[in-house]
Amino acid sequence: MTKKKNILITGGAGFIGSHVVRLFINEYPEYKIVNFDALTYAGNLENLTDVENAENYTFVKGDITSVKDVQRVFEDYNITDVVHLAAESHVDRSISDPSAFVKTNVNGTVNLLNAAVEHWKDAYDEHLFYHVSTDEVYGSLGETGLFTEETPYDPKSPYSASKAASDHFVRAYHNTYGLKTVISNCSNNYGPNQFPEKLIPLLINNIKNNKPLPVYGKGLNVRDWLYVKDHATAIRIVFENGKKGETYNIGGHNEWRNIDIVELVCDLTDAKLNREKGKSRELITYVKDRAGHDMRYAIDATKIERELGWKPSLRFEEGIEITIEWYLKNTRWLERVTSGDYLAYYEEQYSR
Ligand code: NAD
Ligand code: DAU
């Protein structure tokens, strides 16, 4: 018989977290899924309205940087496993406020690790601490090459430095205390429910509102895009079959220069809005480059494909269509998340 699990998913009200929470609720009816999220500007329970009444689901508002909140959720729900996604996740914000990233991404992760060590110390092997991380810890690539699990860490932004530090702490707790851990490092995600500070939803929102489309530098930086539901599936597979202490890279074999993505999103969105072809390309505006802008990310995902049998299910051409349609259809969601604080952030970020 499968042993009952009470799985703590941190950051489950965010972009990727909400897709992971939904997948786990549906895949594991016999397990309890506890979504622990502080509901920062990036957390939004509207992302989960379709599953909020599921019997095996509970939402707990709590902060991973609070020892008390973390202790309490471990005790109240007898947490057996952790899937840790909560983080400050936007590189531009990390450039204006690095300390917030140290607090959440480093101290918050260490708080969770401490709680796991304390609560699971009698039987580490029966519990899993799964840390969800990013390919940005490996730094920046030149024109060729791919990040493998053996690529040395070389983080270059305050965001990636804080994620790298959190990865190191997870490995240190595995090595020092014997905590059963796994880490996955994924490339850029896109899809429904992404906060529109990130490139693709920002473009769609601005096209819709006829606002300038800010392209950093020359638009030649390259990102490797993966549909968010394929990342969520990879997380489920690593959760189930990942080997203790191991790291898995996750990516879509799908590299795009930023300017090519911008033009593609313009053309596809114009078609859906019945606008004249080429209309939105007129909104493209080259702006000051991001400080320390990483040139290229690209993931070698052969380990997870070979060892765990994961592969992206969706072609980019399909994923990007679904994504644009989602933002155009979910106008209330988009309007709500782009009011209030977002306007102040946008003004500050793009008026420099
Ligand atoms: P997101 O910013 O959309 O969501 C982050 C969530 O964490 C939000 O719900 C927020 O409320 C919550 N949170 C923030 N601080 C918290 C705190 N102190 N306590 C509790 N909850 C808190 O992020 P995302 O893009 O969904 O990324 C999720 C994870 O995946 C992050 O760890 C990120 O580093 C990693 N990742 C993201 C990408 C990507 O392309 N977005 C790619 C690879 C890895
Ligand atoms: O690689 C994984 C990472 O991908 C995740 O760990 C991060 O959490 C996630 O935010 C993402 O980081 P990026 O910095 O690559 O994503 P972003 O959407 O901010 O930017 C994508 C590219 O587009 C990047 O080269 C910067 C550029 N850009 C971004 C914005 C917001 C622009 O040219 N204009 C913009 O307005």
Image (cartoon, rainbow, N blue to C red):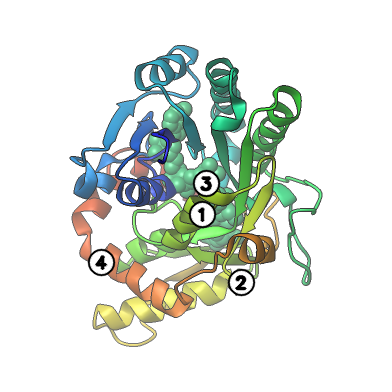
Q: Is residue 147 above or below residue 107?
A: below
Q: Nearer the viewer, residue 149 or 182?
A: 182
Q: Position of residue 194 (x, y in %)?
A: 39, 53
The residue under label 3 is 239
| Nearest to viewer (mark 1 / mark 2) | 1
Q: Residues within 10 Å of mark 1 (few under 14, many from 20)?
A: some
Residue that protrudes farthest toward the front in the picture: 1
In-front residue for pair 247/32: 32
Q: Amino acid at mark 3?
A: Phe
Mark 1–mark 3 Cα distance, whole angstroms, equals: 5 Å
Reading the image, the residue beneath label 2 is 253
* Disc nearer the start of the sequence (2/4): 2
> What percent of the width, then of the height, locates residue 107?
59, 23
Task: Tell me the amino acid under the disc marked 4.
Answer: Leu
- Tell me which numbered mark, 4 or 3, is placed earlier along the sequence: 3
Spatial CA distance of label 3 from label 2 is: 22 Å
